[in-house]
Amino acid sequence: MTPRRVKAGHDQKVRRFVRSMSREERMLVVLKRDLYEGNWSDMIADLQARLEGKPYIFKLANRISDDLERIERLNDYEKKNDVDLSDLVEIET
């Protein structure tokens, strides 16, 4: 996936959004980037397969339904703002 740069007009808005993200949301964005090559659809399919008892790629905590809701929110935000949050989010240690 080609990284999208944050547009000047969106910069403040996007950074404010990133600062408001929960630890769980940050983790999902990083996992999307690192394990799913930046693709929400692959990550969603993987989580849904796990819920259905099918083979899956990555074992997340037992909060799959919550994660799917978070992914939907994050994916919608990226589409509406033409930004890839994984360009801006790191896991805090």
Image (cartoon, helix red, strand yellow):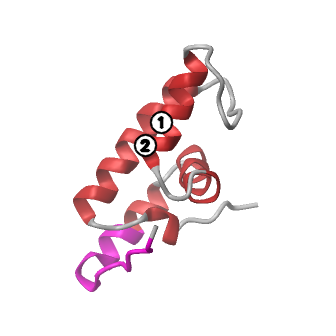
Q: Residue at x 46, y 32 (%)?
A: 68
Label ID, residue 44 = 1
What crowding class fits label 1: few (fewer than 14 Cα within 10 Å), some (14-19), or many (20 or more)? some
Query: Which structural element holds mark 1?
Result: helix
Label ID, residue 18 = none
Q: Position of residue 21 (x, y in %)?
A: 48, 53
Identity of the residue furthest to the bottom in this view: 8
Span highlighted in magenta in the image: 2-15
Q: Quadrant of the C terminus?
A: bottom right
One can see residue 38 in this view:
yes
Instruction: Report if residue 59 lies within the magenta region.
Output: no
Q: Position of residue 18 (x, y in %)?
A: 45, 62
Q: Residue at x 50, y 28 (%)?
A: 66
**Where does label 2 land, which residue?**
41
Identity of the residue furthest to the top in this view: 53
Q: CA distance from mark 2 to mark 1?
A: 5 Å
Query: Which three-letter amino acid code belongs to the residue tagged 1?
Result: Ile
What crowding class fits label 2: few (fewer than 14 Cα within 10 Å), some (14-19), or many (20 or more)? some
Apparent side of residue 20 relative to residue 23 in the rendered image (left or right) = left
Q: Position of residue 19 (x, y in %)?
A: 48, 63
Query: Which three-letter amino acid code belongs to the residue tagged 2?
Result: Ser
Instruction: Report if residue 4 lies within the magenta region.
Output: yes
Apparent side of residue 78 relative to residue 86 in the rendered image (left or right) = left
- Whether pointer 2 and pointer 1 mark residues with C-beta atoms closer than 8 Å, the reply is yes
Apparent side of residue 69 relative to residue 10 in the rendered image (left or right) = right
Query: Which structural element holds mark 2?
Result: helix
Apparent side of residue 70 relative to residue 9 in the rendered image (left or right) = right
Identity of the residue furthest to the front in this view: 55
Q: Is residue 15 above or below residue 64?
A: below
Give the total number of marks visible in the rendering: 2
Quadrant in the picture for residue 78: bottom left
Quadrant in the picture for residue 46: top right
